Amino acid sequence: MTRMHLQRFAVIVMLLASVACGGGNGDDDDNNPVGPIGTGQGSDPQITNNTDDFQWQLSNASGFSTNGGYTWRNTGTRARVTNSSNFSSGTGTLTVRDSGGRIVFSGNLSTNGTFTTDSGPTGDWRIELAPSGVSGTLSFRVQKD
């Protein structure tokens, strides 16, 4: 092979490797900066994922559905969940898991208020969002308690 053929071959191999390793199909939502892929219509969600403070809001949703979640760093042993969603149709749940994978909170997205999770070990917690056919605004916050 000539030098030019080797260079072209190397570029093709690198391209194929990058697609195979990082191209993804959206199934691994931890690598998706905006989280799980949803269906339906709405503005882009506003997401803030900082240590000890996670916020998620989607305005003007219409028939929005998704099922996935986010890794969130909690340096405490409990969290405070504040739900201020306002939607006219659809259903959904919000689930919080501690760093061991145990469910420490599960609530209906249509029930507003402030709730405290059960205790769990510090570390990478998981926030799972599962709305189905929601029209309106989805808005919640999870903070270290």
Image (cartoon, rainbow, N blue to C red):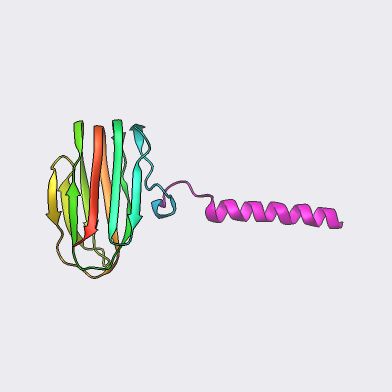
Principal SS element in the magenta part?
Answer: helix
Residue 131 visible to an observer of this rendering: yes
Horizontal side of residue 35 vs 5, given as left or right: left
As displayed, is residue 127 above or below residue 64? below
Report which quarter residue 121 is drawn in. Answer: bottom left
Identified at 25% across, 39% down, the residue is 138
Q: Residue 94, percent across and down?
A: 22, 48
| Residue 1 shows in the view | no
Tally the numbered discs. 0
- Indicate whether residue 91 is drawn in magenta: no
Residue found at x 16% / y 66%: 119
**Which residue reaches farthest bottom?**
121
Picture residue at 18% right of the left edge, 62% below the top:
145
* Residue 114 coordinates in the image, percent (x, y): 13, 51
In the rendered image, residue 5 lying in the magenta stretch gets the answer: yes
Q: In the image, residue 80 lies at what x, y percent?
A: 18, 57
Q: Quadrant of the N terminus?
A: bottom right
Q: Position of 96 compared to 3: left or right?
A: left
Q: Position of residue 33 (x, y in %)?
A: 42, 50
Q: Which residues are magenta?
A: 2-28
**For residue 102, above or below residue 55:** below
On screen, residue 99 versus residue 13, left or right, reads: left
Q: Nearer the viewer, residue 42 or 48?
A: 48
Q: Is residue 62 above or below residue 83?
A: above
Image point (65%, 51%), residue name? 15
Front-most of residues 19 and 137: 137
Q: Nearer the viewer, residue 45 or 135?
A: 45
Quarter of the image for residue 63 reads: top left
Kindly indicate the quadrant of the structure image that contains residue 100.
Answer: bottom left
